[in-house]
Structure formats: C-alpha cells, structure tokens
Image: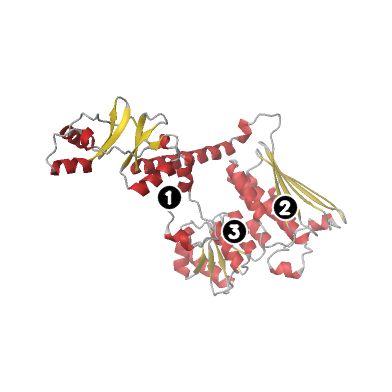
Amino acid sequence: MAERSSADEGLGSARPRLITKSQELIYELRIGDIMTPNPITVTPDCLMSELKEILRVRRISGVPVVDRGELVGIISIQDLIQALEQGEISARVGDKMTRQVQVAYADESVVQAVNKFARYGFGRLPVVERDGRLVGILTQGDIVRGLLRQLEVQWHEEEIHRYRASHIFEDIESDQTGLVLRYRVVARDFVHGGEASSKLKRALERLGAGPQLVRRVAVAAYEAETNLIIHTDAGGDLIAEIQPNQIRIVALDRGPGIPDIERALQPGYSTAPDWIRELGFGAGMGLNNIKACADWFALDSQVGVGTRLEAMFYLTSRTDKEAT
Amino acid sequence: MTVEDVVRATGLTVITGEAALQREVTGGYASDLLSCVMARARRGNLWVTLQAHTNVVAVASLLELAAVIITEGTQPDEAARAKAEAEGVVLLSSPETTFAVVARLAALGVGAGS
C-alpha cells in the first residue's frame, strides 16, 4: 500500500511523486480509528484444542494471548497446524505462542502498521496503548475498510459543502448579504475568452440559482467579457455581486471609451476590426444581448477615461423573457 | 434523438466529447456570429458553424449545447480541442458546407430550436 510502485520510480527522482488520496489518508488516520476494538483473546492456560474451536467458530486466524490484562504473546492458525502435526493438540497456548510480539500503537499513524505488515508479513497486529494495555487488533482488511469508510466520510463532507454553498444566504445573517466575485479579463486574450463567464456560471449553479436565471446572467456576462477582450486597451474587470434577490453584473475598464453610446447600442453596429470579425465576433449584437437578458441595464462611458456597464437581474422577475 | 443518432445518420466525425454523445438534441441553429448564437441558440441545440476556435467552445459550454458541427472540414486548433475536452463539449466535423449539413439535419427531423 505504501510501497513505491515501479511506475513511480520510472518518473525519475526530479519529479515530485504524486500522492494519492489513499496515501494521504494512511498518514492522517490513526490506527485506533480503524482497528477492531475489544478483540477476542485467550490466556496462556488455554489448550490448543480449545484454541482450534475458537478459531473455527469465530472464523479468525489468530488471537493475542493475554495474562492478567497484559499482552504476553500471539498465537495463530500456523502454530495450531504445527501442534496438530506434532500431536500436541493438548498443549497449552502459553507453550506454543510467539512471545516476541510486534505491536501497533493506537495513537500511531496507519502508515506505521502498513510498513510493519510489509516488513514482517504478519496477518494481524495487536494494538496496544502506550501503557501496554491491549485495546484492539488490526488486520490488512481493517486498513482497507478504514480507508474506504474515511473516503465515504470525506465524500459526504463535500456534499455538505455543496449544500452549504447553496444555503449561504440563509446561513449568514445580515441586513444585506452579498457575494462579490471579481474576474480579471485580459485584452485580446481570445484563448481564455469566456472563462470568467464560465466560472461565474458554475458559481451561480453551486449557489442554487435556477437554470433560466443562470443562462441569462451567463449570456450577459459572456458578452461583457468579450467586449473587454475585444475593445479595451488594457482589459478590465468583470464583477458579479450576488444577493438573495438580485444579481448585478458590472464590467469596468479604463479605456478607450465609447464616443457615441446611442450608436453603440444599435443592433448590428460594431467597431470591431476585420480580423476579429473573422473570428465570429463583432456582430454588433453584444450590448443588445446584454440588454435583452437583463432586467435593467446602464452604460456609461467617457472617451479617454473608460466604460462602466451595469446589468441587473432580479430573481423574482418575468420568466417569459427566457422563452424568447 | 441523441447526438450519437445524428452522428451515425449523417456520417459526422467526432473530434471531441466521445463520452457525451448520449445528449438529447433539442433542435438546431446555424451561424458564424457568436453573439447571434448567444442570443438564439438554446440548450441542447446542435450548432452548425464554420468557426473552430476556442471561443466556439466557450459559447457551446455556456449555452450547454448538445454539440457543435464544424463545417467545410475546418479543424479546431489544439487549444480549442483541449478546452473542449476539459469542458465536455462535443465537437463534430463535416466536410460539407453549412447549408448541406443543415439540409441533412432537417431531413432527420431536427427542428429550428425549441
């Protein structure tokens, strides 16, 4: 489990090893968390014939040997087979057990046990507290089960995170709770075009916004983002302010500014250069799309200073708009 | 009708999104102007276009289109392919013109949007 596979070696030492989730977990988890507690034990005076019945009935392959609460040895099915072969089925466990017992400590990380299993090839390890008191037993099966259980717990926690994101506005109390998402948009960066709007869309979905609203905001945000990419000198910011009852999208830039806003708002009017039009932009519909998607829209611009576009979306607004 | 049905019936080549071919097709839209697509294409639509750059992928992803059919054999560049794979966007290719592809889709019963 913890051993390095040959594939890892093949990557070369210069590259950092990839740590898998289960590798991470065997460091995080404590042996005490995954062991089987209150193990079945026998005393040194137990007979091998009695041990045979215990192993058969309990379907186990070995047990710790305890004398007055203290771990004194371990006895396994191999010891039993040997005793049978030698006709010593009536011998005492105390005479046949292994006395030098490797133990695992309950407060140790699971990786320690993994290493011991790998090194000694044991089927099980008694688990003790630091004072020597036996508290459990650990098999490789316990480790697998423990890892699976922990993965499930973490998966469930992620579900809760998702649930919390969708309930953020109910869980956090204020007179007006708002979430502000700001995305930097780089001028002329068509390769990353649409990324800000995609991220915003995902955030809205995670927050539990309805699909129609998400679509309207996403379309408007995409057009605003595209405008920042195509038309600005130095890019700008795409900002979404999310409140329980409304979403405000603001696109801000520092120039060059729009000389004639009225004209810019006319459908089909575009100042995009030919090379940008060839990419499919510059239809002259961007601002109209934003206006059509939003419940309220404003465009302020000053040549040489910059442009501020603002679009509002009300959560209780007309839904008939979506159908068009 | 799923994207896979359309692919099989019209002999389109799947460029990306092999895993998402079971998506249901709700209709179609054809344009090379992204803002027009943004305004008119609907979720689950097939989009027929000559354009093949990364912003096509962005638009298809934002609108949750069923697939993009890129016509006249235009090939998306590596960045567009990578983005499409990452976003789970289905890119299909046809050697025919947009007009011919739309005619085939119409014959299959793909309607104009929904």
Would you say residue A215 is visible in this rendering?
no
Q: Position of residue B38 (x, y in %)?
A: 65, 57
Residue at disc 1, secondary structure: loop
Residue at disc 3, secondary structure: helix
Q: Chain of mark 2?
A: A
Tell how many labels: 3
* Above or below, comparing residue A112 to residue B71 in the picture: above
Q: Nearer the viewer, mark 1 or mark 2?
A: 1
Asked whether disc 1 touches disc 2, contact meaning CB atoms under 8 Å apart, the reply is no
Q: Nearer the viewer, mark 3 or mark 1?
A: 1
Would you say residue A159 is visible in this rendering?
yes
Mark 1 packing: few (<14 Cα in 10 Å), some, or many (20+)? few
Q: Quadrant of residue A68?
A: top left
Q: Is residue A278 left or right of residue A323?
A: right
The residue under label 1 is A2
Residue at disc 2, secondary structure: strand
Q: Quadrant of residue B43?
A: bottom right
Residues at marks 2 and 3 on the same chain: no
The residue nearer to you, when weighing A105 against A7, is A105
Disc 3 from disc 1: Cα separation: 43 Å
Q: Position of residue A235 (x, y in %)?
A: 76, 57
Disc 1 from disc 2: Cα separation: 42 Å
The residue under label 3 is B60
Question: Which mark is drawn over residue A184?
Answer: 2
Q: Position of residue B39 (x, y in %)?
A: 66, 56
Q: Chain of mark 3?
A: B
Residue at the image point whose x is 27% and y is 31% from the top: A41
Q: Nearer the viewer, mark 2 or mark 3?
A: 2
